Amino acid sequence: MLHLVADLGNTTGKFALLKDGELLSMHRTADRGTDALRTFLADSVPDAWIISSVRTDSSEITAYLQDLAPGFVLDHQMPLPINITYETPETLGHDRIAAMVGAWKMFPGKPVLVIDAGTCIKYDILLPDGSFPGGTIAPGLRMRLEAMHTFTGRLPFVEIPEQTWPEGPPVTGTSTAGSLLSGALAAGLLEAEGMIAYYQQNQPYLKVLLTGGDAPFFASRLKSQIFAVPELILSGLDEILRFQFNAI
């Protein structure tokens, strides 16, 4: 079956086509509406679809897809291959759910820490029994720089350099710009290493997966052994869609 999966995030959307779990094509766009989807599907008709939306109203896209094939809008109450034990599952971001399912698909029966480095940086833990108790949500790299500028009187906004330091930015900034970059970038790396070390204390065979728009920054600089999986959420959505048809 040809599956369409749509990940509508905070800043961008992703549309992808998968067949038998293999990614055939993917399009990232700031336009998370029906026009962009129509263009993406110009030469394809999916057999089934699933949508994950963080904050975008997906009703228009859903109405369009319902005329093409059966499908689902991801919801925490759907049957899932993992067990959500989060205290407030109704507030749980759908991207976090999909990432956890993608992690379970890659490493069933293993403890997995997923680091999703996007607008926010999310650290979510999946336990060996398949339960997902939650994790941590922290400001993303750019958000840290914007916040320090916005909520102070004199600190400038500093762009993240195109070519950054191979080993990571210096912890000790020797200028205001350097200090701000240290607070955002060097502190972000130290935070990630600390989170990994924390979970490894109780889960010595921990697997660490890295995804999200800022994943390349972390992937080349984290000292811990990690697996970079850029399309983890898309893979998780595809697995959830497969699970729905088996559960019906």
Image: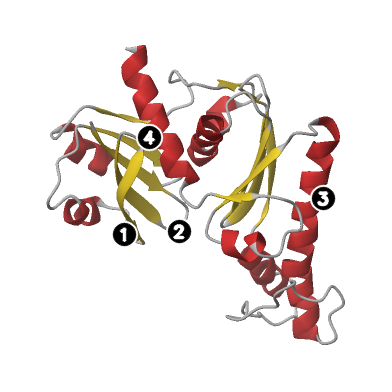
Circle 4 Cα neighbour tier, 10 Å, few/some/many (<14 / 14–19 / ≥20): many
Earlier residue among tags 2 and 3: 2
Farthest top residue in view: 248
Q: Residue at x 44, y 18 (%)?
A: 79
Q: Earlier in the sequence, mark 3 or mark 1?
A: 1
What kind of element bears circle 3? helix
Task: Determine the CA span between mark 1 and mark 2.
Answer: 9 Å
Q: In the shown orientation, is residue 179 left or right of residue 17?
A: right
Q: Which residue is mark 1?
A: 31
Counting residues from the N terminus, which is met first, the one under dot 4 or under dot 2? 2
Q: CA gap, disc 4 to disc 1?
A: 22 Å
- Which mark is on residue 194? 3
> Residue 167 in the image: x percent, y percent?
75, 72
Nearest the eye: 91 or 237: 237
| N-terminal-most mark, 1 or 2 | 2
Residue annotated with mark 4: 238
Describe the element under mark 2 as helix, strand or loop.
loop
Q: Disc 2 designates what residue?
A: 11
Q: Nearer the viewer, mark 2 or mark 3?
A: 3
Around disc 3, counting alpha carbons within 10 Å, would you say few (fewer than 14), some (14 to 19), or many (20 or more)?
A: few
- The answer to whether residue 103 is above or below residue 158 is above
**Could you tell me which residue is drawn at 61 percent across and 79 percent down?**
159
